[in-house]
Amino acid sequence: MKTKHTFTVIFFTRKSRSNPKQLSIYVRITINGKRSEISLKRSIPSKDWDNNKSRGRGSSQKVRTLNTYLDEVYNKLLECHKELLVEDKFISSEAIKARYLGEDDNSKTLRELIAYHHGNMAFALKKGTMKNYYTTEKYLYKFLLKKRRLKDIYLKQLNYEFVTDFEHFLRNYKNSKKQLMLSNNGVMKHLERFKKMVNLAVKLEWMHKNPFNQFQLKYQKYDRAFLSERELELLESTEFKNERLQRVKDCFLFSCYTGLSYIDVKELTEDNIVKGIDDRYWIYTKREKTDECVKVPLLPKALEIIEKYRALQKEDYTDGLLPISSNQKTNKYLKEIAGLCNIHKNITFHVARHTFATTIMLSNGVPIETVSKLLGHSKLTTTQLYARVIETKISEDISNLLERFKIRGKKLKAKS
């Protein structure tokens, strides 16, 4: 806010309470007659202070050092006034004082930004997402301490160099066993979360330049693991005498035929099973991750698994529709199950979701738009990351195309 105003800076003294022969030095900022004062934490003998010049009197080393410091304070206050004008901020003596002392928004630090972000986002983001932000926070503090020898840094000091140095730190970070901790995409995820926090600072006007403007996040594309039709049949036909493995297998297969993630399967109750307009059973639920509504028709094999455990529900467990273990234990048991079934893939529970999208749906001609709705994705591009058209489907489509060419050729011959 640019307005006409008077602006003065003067230095003055007051008698020291602890030493009557010493004067304590202050600076007074005046805007349109309204004053703000700052103690400079400096003192000078009464005989060495020149009231007319508002400076130390004499040419001793101590006086010259003091006067140099006063000149620096004066120039810094002028710079604060100029910054507020450029930023179109309200100009007042208190605003200049706050800018000088580093108490305004322009002097916020990285720790203050992280605390603000976590405090406001803890209710908006899921616990798993917040857990990832806490991990990024730890890496940022480790980087500051090891590479910059700092516990905190002003936001206005963040620049492109800081971002690239942080990236380099993440790429080379090793654990106690001297093993690299992060893949390329792991590094990019931490930088993406840091970027979101910086974007928040820009929106709050705590920063005026975004250090990520010239920085590009570069994720490596890779094929997501899924079970082929043969592997899925192999898993289905294998029965385990070990009840723990059998239950994990059943929960995994249920996800293969519904596309639900681990947490969404865990949260399922009888209330989520509804009869649809087609007189078939459907799952009506909300994705824990995105809050998107999901409606999935229950395929026969998924319904069989539900019915299998309905009878056991009251006897063995009460929390959900299926007897699913913790995510960590489930993934551990799935590796054991894959080995026993001679499936040579690194299987986690999320592989079931990929299997649903690829082997159950797309490979059987279900349009990707329908698959996207069943997976609860808000964007089609997200579904395209899960889905891939496997060779057998390509071969089948090309065979159909060649067949159509043959029929068209026969019709043309018949006409001629």
Image (tube, grey):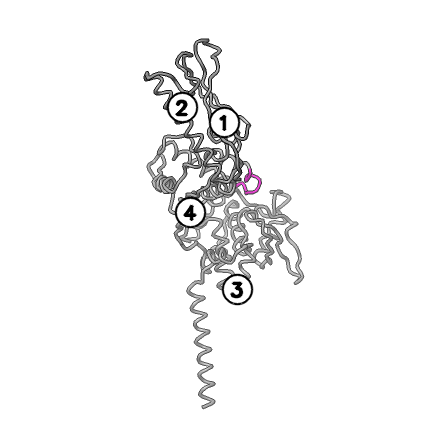
Which of the two discs, 2 and 4, sits closer to the camera? 2
How far separated are the C-alphas under marks 3 and 4? Answer: 38 Å
Q: Secondary structure at mark 2?
A: helix
Image quadrant where one finds the C terminus: bottom left
Residue 367, numbered circle? 3
Q: Position of residue 170 (x, y in %)?
A: 37, 40
Q: Earlier in the sequence, mark 4 or mark 1?
A: 1
The disc, 2 or 3, on the residue closer to the chain's N-terminal end is 2
Residue named by callout 4: 213
Q: Nearer the viewer, mark 3 or mark 1?
A: 1
Name the outermost residue toward the top.
Answer: 20
- Percent coordinates x, y for residue 303 in the rendering: 60, 56
Q: Kindly identify the residue that appears in the image at 48 percent across and 40 percent down.
A: 87
Q: CA distance from mark 2 to mark 3?
A: 74 Å
Q: CA distance from mark 2 to mark 4?
A: 38 Å
Marked residue nearer the N-terminal end (2 or 4): 2
Quickly name the residue at label 1.
29
**Kind of residue sitting beneath label 1:** Ile
**SS type, badge 3:** loop
